[in-house]
Each structure stands twice: as C-alpha cells, then as structure tokens.
Amino acid sequence: MPPSQLKQLKASLRDSGVLGPQKSKKQKRQNAKSGANAQNRAQRETALEAIRDRFNPFEIRTISRNKFDVTTRDSGSKPAAGRFRPGVTKSLGEEKRRQTLLQEMDRKNKVGGIMDRRFGENDPTMTPEERAAERFARASQKKLRKDSMFNLEEEDDDEEFTLTHKGESLSFGGGEGAQDDFEEELEVDDMSDSEMPRKRKRLLDDGEFEEPGSQDEEEVPGRKKSKHEVMQEVIAKSKFYKAQRQMAKEDDDDLREELDKGLPDLFEMLRGVKPPPKPEPPKSDIASMNPDRAALLQGKSQVDTEAEYDQRLKQLTFDKRSMPTDRTKTEEEKIEEEAQRLKKLEEERVRRMRGEEVSEDEAEAEEEDEEDDEDADMFEEESLPDDAKDFGLQQPTTTSHTTSRPEGIDDEDDFILDDLVETRSDASASFDEEDDDMLDSNEEFEEEEDEQEDELINGFTLPDGSKPGEGAATSDMPADGLAYTYSCPGTHGEFLEIIKDATYENLPTVIQRIRALHHPRLHSENKAKLGRFAAILVRHVAYIADQPEHPPFAIVENVLRHIHSLAKTYPESVSLEFRAQLREIATERPLNLRPGDLVILTGVAAIFPTSDHFHAISTPAHLCLARYLGQGPVNSLSDLCTGTYVASLALQYQTVSKRYMPECLNYILNALYLLSPEAPPSQPHLGSFPLRNPAETNSQSQSQSLRLKFVKTLTLRKLQFWDMTNSTTSQSETEDLKLALLTTLISLLDTASNLWSSMSAAPEILEQAISVLQHISSSSSSSSSSTPSKKTKKLAQLPPSSLTTLQSTLTNLTTHLSTSQKARRPLLLHDHRPLAIKAAIPKFEDTFNPDKHYDPNRERAELNRLKAEYKRERKGAMRELRKDANFVAREKLREKKEKDAEYERKYRRLVAEVQNEEGREANAYEREKRLRQGKR
Amino acid sequence: MPATIDKSTGSKKRKSTKENGVPSSKRRAVAEHESTESMAKILELEEQISESRKHYNNIATLISMLSKEGSGINPDLAVAVSLCRVFSRLIAGGNLTETNHAAENEKIVVAWLRERCREYQRLLVAIMRESDASSQATALTLAMRLLNERATHIPGDDNQAWTSGLFPNIFEAVIEARDGQALRSEFLEKFVKPYEDVTYHTFMQVAAYASTARSTEILEILVTLLSACDSVPNPDHEFENFYSKTSKQNKKLLSVNSHKKRAQDAWLAILRNNLSQPLRKTLLRIMVHHIEPWFARPELLMDFLTDSYNVGGATSLLALSGLFYLIQEKNLDYPQFYPKLYSLLDADLLHSKHRSRFFRLLNTFLASTHLPATLVASFIKRLSRLALNAPPAAIVAIMPFIYNLFKEHPTCTFMLHRVIRDDEAKAEIEAEGMEDPFDPEEPDPDRTGAIDSSLWEIESLQSHYHPNVASIARIISEQFTKQSYTLEDFLDYTYQGMVQAELGTGEKPLKKIPVVEYQIPKRIFTDRLLEEDGGIDTASGSLMRALWDFS
C-alpha cells in the first residue's frame, strides 16, 4: 500500500530539493551575490511544476498509445510529445467565457448603461499598469498639444498650468509644501537622476535582457510611477545618439579634408608631369553631371537646365550607332528575297488550309481539355446539345485561327505594314495614296523599281488616264468636274451624296482622292474614318452591281481592289461589313441571289483566302453558295445562269484546297439534266443526285423550254454575267443561251473532276457525271429514235466547239475514273496504336507523407481538403457551443442557487421574527390565561 | 313570344332585301311595304293554323310560299321560320302521332300532315344544299330544331329520326352543300362539337356515307370534319351535353366504348375508300394524334398502313412509324420489312423534309444487335453513298449514326480497315486497284456485298468544304473510344442554322481578325494587264474569267 498523499508530497519535495535543510545566512548572502539565488529559484519553480503535474494525474493527458509507430519528418503538426493540458485549457476557456459570455448574460435584456471608453479598458492584453501608463502618456500629450497655443512658459515643461485667483495660485494645501502626491512623484523621479544611466545601460545591454524572471519581477512594482521616467529616458537616449552621430560625421569630414588636400600631389605623382593649370571645366562635363548641380555651378536657372537636359537626352536617343550600311542588293537577290517572302506566306496559307498545325492525335488529346471553355462560348447562341459539342465541332476553328494568323495583319501602323511585313503590293498601295502628298520623287523611284507596284499604280490611275501627280490632277480636274477634296463619308448615304454627280468612270478617282485626303498619317482620326470608308465601299460595290444600268466591270474590279488594299490595313471593319452582307443574304434572300450578292461573293474569293480550313468570312460564304446550289430555284434560264455562276464561284473557291462540295456537283448534274435536249429515261437513275424540276406552277411549258432545242443557227458564245438578269426574247437567243449554259456547265464538270479526281470516292462521283454526259452526247448526236423528222438535222445540231468540249470532258472524266479506280485500295483507317488499358496498380511514392494527399485529381483533392477543413471547423464550433451552453447552464444554476439561498435566508429570518412575536404573544396569552385561571 | 320572333325575322328580311341592293329609295320603300305586307300575311296564316284545324290547308300555302319552284334557291326565310314554329307546335301537340283507335278521317289528316312535314323537311334540305350561306345556316338551325322536336315528342321516332330519317338527309346536305364551307363550320361548331349525341350520330353517318366510294373532295371534307372531333373521351367520361333530351335514355349514347366504336368505324370507312396520294399523306400525318386514339383495336389499321408503306417514297416514310408500332405491339407480320426499308434509302431521302423523322425511326429499327452484319453493312454503305450527294445537315446526322452502327456491329468495321493477307489478292489489288464489291442495284440488303467493300465515300467527305462537317466525318477514322453518340443532337441542323452559327445574329466584334489574302490580284473580272503574263491567265480566279464574259 503506498503511503498517503501527504507523505508522498513531502518525500518528493525533499527529493527535488525544494525542502531542504535551512541554509545559513552566510550561504544565503553568497548565493545572492553570485546570482545562484535566481538560478535556484528557477530550478525550484520547475521542480514544483513537475511535482504538481505528477500529483494531479488529470492535469496532463498523454496520448495513451500510438496506433502505428511512424516516423515522419515534420513532427510539428502535433503538440509537443503528445502532451495536452486539459485542465489549463479548460480553465482558460472558463476564464474567457466569464469575461465575454457572462458579461453578455448580465447585459441581456438590459437597456442603457455606461460605455467605458477609457483607453485600454476593453483590451484584455494590457495589464492594469500598462493601461495606467498609457493613459497618463496620452493625457500629458493632450495637455501639451492644447497648451502650445497659449503656453507662455515654454521652458518649463513640467509646470502645470495652474488656476489662479487674484494672482494667487489655487492649490488645495496652499503653499509650496502641499503638493499633489502625483506631483510629488514627479519630483522624486526628477531627482533620481542617478537611476537613469543604469536604466539606459540595461536597455542597451543585450546580455542583461536574456535574464528573465527575477529582475523583471523586481521591476514590475517600480513601473507604476516610471512613465515619466521612461519618457525622459527616451529623450535622453535620442539626444545621446544624435550627439554621437554628429561627432562621427565631424571626424569623417576632417579625415576627408585631409585626404583631399593630398590628392593633387597624388595625381602629380601618378603622371609624373605637372599639368597645365586647368581652365574652366568644359561644357560637356556640365552636361554630363546632374543638371541641378550644373545649374548651381553655372548660375543658370533650373528651367533652362532641365530644357537643355531634355534636349540632350533626345539627341542621344536619336543618335545612331555607326553601322555598316546596307549593301545595295543585286537584282537576283531582290527576286530571291521576294520569292522567300511569298513562299513563307504560301506556307502559312497551306497550314491554314490544313486547318491546324498541331498534329491530329495531339489535337485529339487537347480536345478534352479545351472543349469546355472554348465550345461553351462558341455554342452559346446556338444552344447546341451536348453530343454534337462533344467532339469539338468548332475545335479547329479557334485553334487554327489563333495559331495560323500571320502577325502582320494588325492595324497597328501603316509604316510597319509597308516596311516590314506586308507585301510590296501593299506598300505600293500606300504609296499611291501618298503621291498626292509629298513623296513624288520617291514614288517615281519605287515605280521603276517594282514591276508589280508599277502595275498597281497604273491600275489606280487607269480610269482617269493620267498619273495622279499634283500637276496632272489639276490639269484634268476641270474636265472631270470633280472636286479636289471630299469629306470622308460616315455612311453609305453620305457616300452616295458625294458621288451623285460623278460618273462610274470617275468613281475610282473619287475613292482614291478620299483615301489620299484622309491618309492615316495626316490625322489621328483618319484611321477610324478610313475604316468606316472601307466598309462603305463594300456596301457600295454591292449597291452598284444591283443598279439597273450595269456598271462596267472594270470599275467594280477597281473598287474591289481598293477594298482589298484597305482590308490589309483595316481588316476588321472590312470583314465585319462582309459578314454583315453575308448575313443579309442569308436571312433575306438565301435562294434569290442578286447580282450585288454575287459580286460580294466574288469579292470574298478575291480578298480572303477561301482555302482556309476555317475562315470567319469564307466559311459562311461557302455555306451561302452551297445553300443556293442545294435549294435554289431552277425555274427559268436566268435562275440557271445564276446557279451556273454560283457553281463556278464555288469551284473557284476550291481551286487550291480541293475540298468536296456535294451541292455543287448536284447542281451541275441537275442543270445538265434539265438542259439536255431530251429527257433521260426515268427508271434507271443517272446518279444518286436528287432530281429537282422546275416548280409545278410554271407547268409543262416552262420545263420544256429549258431543254435545248435545235434550231439552225446555234452559235456558241461565252456566258455573260448579265444573262442572269436579262430576259432574252427571241427564240434563237434563248437557244444560244441554253447552249452557252450547257457548254459552261460541261466545262465546270471538267474542272470539278480535275479538283476531285484524287479523292478516294472519285469513281462514285465521276460515274454520275459520266452517265449524265453520256446521256447528253447520245441525245444530242446519235439519238435518232425520238423523232424521225429531225433525224437528219440532229447530227449537225451541236456546234463543233461545244461538241469537242463535251467529248474532251468525257474522255477526261473517263481517264480520271480509270486512274482513280486503279489507285483505289481498301481503307486502312484504323491503324491506330492500341489504347493502353487502364492500370489499377497504385503508384508508389518515394517520399510518402501520410499527412499529404496524393490525389492526382487536383479538383478532387481541393474538394477533399475543403471538406476536411469544414468538418474540423464544424466540430470545433459545436464543441465551443456546447461548452458555452454548459457554462450558461452552470451560471444560471449558480444564480438560482444564490437566489434560493437568499430566499431561504429571508424566509428563515421572517419565520424567526414571526415566531418571536408569536412567542411573545403566546406567552402573553399564557400569562393572561394563567391569570384568569388564577382568578377563577 | 311569337311577336318578337316575328320582329326579328322581319328585320332580317328587311336587311336581306336591302342587301340585295335596290337602287332607288322609292323602290326600296315599295319593297319594304311589300315585305311588311307579306309578313303580316304569313303571321295571319300561322295564327289561323294554330287556331283551328280548318285552316290546315294554310300549311300547304305556306310551303308553296317558301319555295316557288320546289328548289332551294332564294327561299323566303320568314316562311321557313314560321313553318318550323307551326310544325313544332303540331308535333308537340301530338297531331302528327297516329293513334290506333282514331277515326278514319283523323288518320287521313295525320297522314296528310306527315306528308306536309316531309315536304317541308325536303325543302329545308334543298335550301341547305343550294342556297346562299346565310339561308343555309338558318335552314340548318331550323332542320335541327325540327329534328329535336320529332325526337322528343314522337314516340319511337327518336331513333328513326337520327339514324334513317331527317338527320342523314341533313348530314348529306351539309357534306354535299354547294359553297358549304360556312355551313360546315356552323354545323361543326354549333352542333357536332358541343353536343355529344350529335357527334355520335355524325360518326355513324360518316361510316355509312363513306362506305361507298366517294370523290376526293368529299373525302377531304369528311377528314376535316372527323379530325375536328379530336377529343377522345376518357374511359370514365360521363356524357352530359345532349342536343335532344331523349338521348339520355339511350344506353348506347352513354357508353364510351360505343362512341369509340362509331368513330373507329367512321375512320375505317374513310381509310378504306379510294384515297388520293396527298390525302393519304395527310391521313398518315394525323394518324398518331387524331386517328389512332379512337381505335380500340389498332390492328384494324394494318391494311391501310401496309398499303401505304408499299406505295414508296414519302408515303412510306410516313407509314413507317405506325407500321413499326403494329409490328412491335400487335404482332403484325411484315416479311419484307428490311428490304423495303432499304429501298426507301433513295436519292431524295436525304433532301426530304422528313429526313430527321426517318432517321429517328431508322435508329430504332437498326437498334437491335441481332441483325445480321451484312444487312447493317448494306445500310451503312448505302447511306454513305447517299452522303456523297447530301447537304451538310444530312451528313452531320449520318456520321454519328454510322458510328453508332459500327459500335454495335464490330464485324462491319472491316469496311473501315481491311488488311489483305492473301499475297495474290494483294498483288492484284496493287496492280488493278480495288473493285468495289458493293452492288448498288441489288434490292436485298443481305446480298449487296457491302460488307466486303470500304467506305471511301466517308473518307472523301473528310475533306468536305464545311469545317464542322469535315471534322464530324473524321470521327469515323479515329479511335472508337466513345460509347455512342446521341443521334438526337445531330438531327436538326439546317443551312440557316449553320450560317447563323457562323455569322451570328447581329454585329459583334470579331474574336480574331480574319486573314486577308496577301496578294492583291491583278484582275478579278477583266483581262487587265494580261499581256504582262504573256497573255495566259493563270492567276487566281482564272476559272471565272475563262468561263464568263464580264462586260
């Protein structure tokens, strides 16, 4: 059985040396001197602490057992050695609650009260002493500030502003001796100057600071009155430092002076020769030194120097380093360079055509990552459902676009465009604009230099037939009736107003002058103006083509070329306008194209690269063409004319990229079918293209009239653009037009077959075309079965030229067919590397840390982290709340107990009182009773 | 009461005379005078009839006044109205009912009255057939009122009036009426739709009427009439709105089943008639929503659907869904279903407006994994052939569809990847090129040889002019990692939608400034500066300049 607690305590106290034999006085003194006293005390403290801990088994809680024996690098996350002090934390929490929650409880349901605004009253971190000190400091500062205005005795800081009455000071005791104890303290502090150095020393000396405990404990009681002292101390200290610094500086100055004196001698010694007496320092020196100083030296005003400084700086920046001048290049080199540049541009174009530079499988890999953000906005308006989006329908559009764009095409600056990146033709274009300005001589030079450019200038000046030099312009101005200056139009209406007097022939001149007058170099706003003007030109070119009097195509062409050259500088406004035009076409008249629309579509082919895989303008333009070809009417010859034009445009779009266009093929074949002199037999289809016949309303007569009839004078001519609007009347003209259409369509088929012969499905495509052509050739030359009366004529009917076209196309197609047939191999599309099977083996981590999470999925890891944090916080909050509730309950219980006790006490008192009184009365009664009894 | 009615009819009469447009005011006054005079006369005659039986002969007078030549043109409506009142009164008074123990002369009177009543009915029907719209409507109302009186007050006559007597005549008149558009809509809105007994009897009449071959116009009228009654009663529906009160006693009229039976008979009668193609298509189109709900036994539609399916073209497309329902649910045996389906894949299919509908169905039909691979391959090959001539919207739908088929039938993927192991065959192919074993003319999808072919068409479409279509076509040649594509997402593309996707709906700043062709062409339309190139035009756009004369 262990000994009792008391005995244990005694034993342990003795063991740790807290209790021991009494020390002698001498020993004590010795200890105090050597400082062992303090050490002893510290030792004793720790020993006591240990004993306390030992005797209260609940004070320290250790983790009872470790689940796993783990060694980790960072042990810091757990509290040291797994020791908790629940008692301490509990009491701390209790204390804190008493300060906050209890206050709140007391304040609950109470209105009003006094707000304690004294400094530091609500700051629990301050000790009462600190609070008092701080308050005092503030009060004295306030006093100082306030006094400064009326303070008469500046010297005497310490003197209080005293109230007087009739010249005598009002003080309570009266006289010198009776002072406030507060002032008395000050006096005392002032007098104890001797203490100051010691204190400063203590502050300065670091070694002393390391001693905690005893010294501090001693100081604490003294601090109450030491506020003023501290202030004094600080002031003194700063004064001291200042003096020291001053001293050091003076010393340095002395030393430097001494050295400076010796410097000339030193120089002399170095050179060995005595230099001539120096004149004034040269100006350049002044320029190179600080202008302020220079001004001081020279007595110049500050402004002058600064101006000079700026000037010089500018000079420096414009100073060229001497460089070897460019050797004049030989003719061959120039050609070589040009070829290189063109080659580069062509390569870029091809890359765009292929759609992207990233290889296929890379794109596939990226698809997953990129599709979300990119497709999301691409498909926003369309609100496409998931799956169509899924494989990145629009994927190549954005990527290809970002990567393949040549850096030259931003409208940063005309100069850059001209000089560095853009083509010579563009440079010449801008030169053409400048020639009215000032650079005539240069222009001449350029003209001679570059053939292409020369051509372009001529092109621009062609319409008015003279060089647009200053003199030339003046000379032909009156003849034209054209003004020299035009304002730059802001809308198409304004432009129409400007050119309302000008003939078509003068239109290029007007445009040219507007461009020259508003050259971006002349005014900063001109850039925006010309951008708008470019858009207006786009609108105008469609407008003039729609006019009933057909403008000459040279003019349309010229305007288109102007647009092109403007588009290089202002690609955005031009392409936006083109898109607007296309949108108008698509929404208002998709199946009823006007000449203006066709001109716009032709312009697209000329101005924008139609071979691009995706292009903001060519792609919709393609769709417009295809839509017309696929769904447009085939009711009349003019419809067919339009359709043929559109089909040829579509083929022209594809000349480089050679993409397949089903609608185009369908349309050509269908049109040939409609135009062929005889209706083909209906049962075996000529191909798998859908047959479209003229609308029923026009009935039989119209559809009959589309078929080529053989009249005697059938002459072959070229199709004309305006055939699509002109309505020919005479029979022979109509037949001529039909023949022209037929021939054109056949040659289109030829072109198409050339484009598509390399496709793997070429046999299927070509077979349809061949069957249609064979039908035409049979029906136009050899068929004698239908009407015997025409039999004799038939053979000679088709003019020889178109017959040869037909025959050559047929042979061409047959050759293509046979070659593509030969080149055909079974498809081997799925030669992919087999996909890796997903492995479930966990990845081994070399430096595994159980506290870290190795989730490869970042988002999930983040989520888990947040979840854990939330859980922890929630637990903590719940625990706190529970403790709060406990505390509140306890407090309430305590209050109730107090109240009950109070009540009980009161009750007892009252009972006692009553009993007292009752007893007296009872006694009186008894007495009376007894008396009466006695009487009786 | 009669007085007010008189007034109203009188005013109507005046109005109609006014409408006739009498030129001079004097003559109008005379006409008005005349009309009031005749009004008074009619009233007097009517009064007399109600007063005593002596004046029954007035009925004959009135009838002769109603129509001069016995035809329905230009009837005197006031007379018609008053006659209706007279007969209603007589019927209500039991004067038209023959009692067994009546005297001989009594019987003669009744017979005579009945004769007159029939005559009046005949005249009303004639008016409905031939007169102008307003008289037609009035005649219809009067006839229906008379019908109601007869059904209510003549015992044993209620069934007879509806089934064989007056109502069939009215119905026929309505259907065959000249310029009867207004009359028919009146009939529909005022009688057929609100009153369930009228609906019921109309169904009966339609069935009877359409049992003989009728012209297309009549059938169209019948179809519109029937499809207007599209509210199929629920099984627990209570019939309450009846035109004549006696209908409540009729058990048949109260049962939902008999209603449905009548409607079914009516529809069947129409479907069995000789239908024109457009009408057949209309019927097929409304089949699901208007016709099928009436049918307690949809099997009855088999003949019609099978016939329609055999027609071919768009009609077959429309018949497909109904037929499929019957095959699936009602055990219809259609032996040549897949060959027929295969034959539907013709050149026009991908361009038709029923394309997406067809694809939905085709997706269902080919969903089974138990279909032979040869058949599936034939469908794939045929579709890809057609895709060569298809608009982009169709190609966009075909590609995921084919992908899904490949995923379901991996045997078919030989069409995408075929390695020739046989050295001889390999050498031959190297020398000669591969002949396509697919026979497009073969109608039987099991024997086309498609499975031995390759999908060159799809590969060619990978260079389609539209970038999105091209990239969709590319899914076929990439690894088949996706389980399947939701076909529904690819069906409803149009040119308009695609253009709008590219261009947007309004002016918006471009994300990326488009590339501009780096070289300004020397010529676009004209032969400008041709001599510099040695007279041969090789620059871009030479194709256009060669073919077209821009002047």
Image: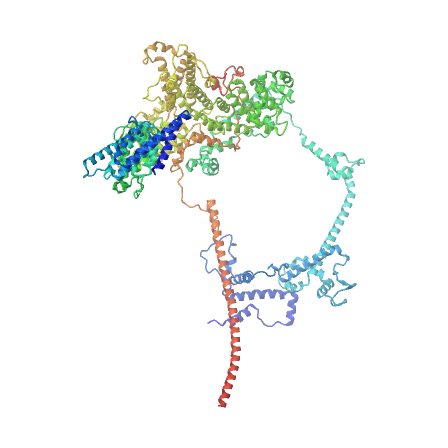
When asked about the image quadrant of residue A466, the answer is top right
Q: Position of residue B182 (x, y in %)?
A: 35, 31
What residue appears at the point 63 percent right and 27 percent down from the top-left corner? A521
Comparing B215 with A740, the one in front is B215
Q: Position of residue A846 (x, y in %)?
A: 47, 47
Comparing B476 with A571, the one in front is A571
Comparing A747 with B320, the one in front is B320
Answer left or right for A39 relative to A268.
left
Q: Quadrant of the N terminus of chain B?
A: top left
The relative height of residue B58 versus residue A645 in the rendered view (above or below) is: below
Q: Position of residue A229 (x, y in %)?
A: 70, 60
Comparing A244 with B372, the one in front is B372
The relative height of residue A691 versus residue A860 in the rendered view (above or below) is: above
When asked about the image quadrant of residue A162, the answer is bottom right
The answer to whether residue B455 of the structure is visible from this angle is no
The answer to whether residue A838 of the structure is visible from this angle is yes
Residue at the right extreme of this rendering: A277
The relative height of residue A662 versus residue B113 in the rendered view (above or below) is: above
Answer left or right for A30 relative to B333.
right
Q: Position of residue B370 (x, y in %)?
A: 30, 36
Answer left or right for A446 relative to A617.
right
When asked about the image quadrant of residue A260, the answer is top right
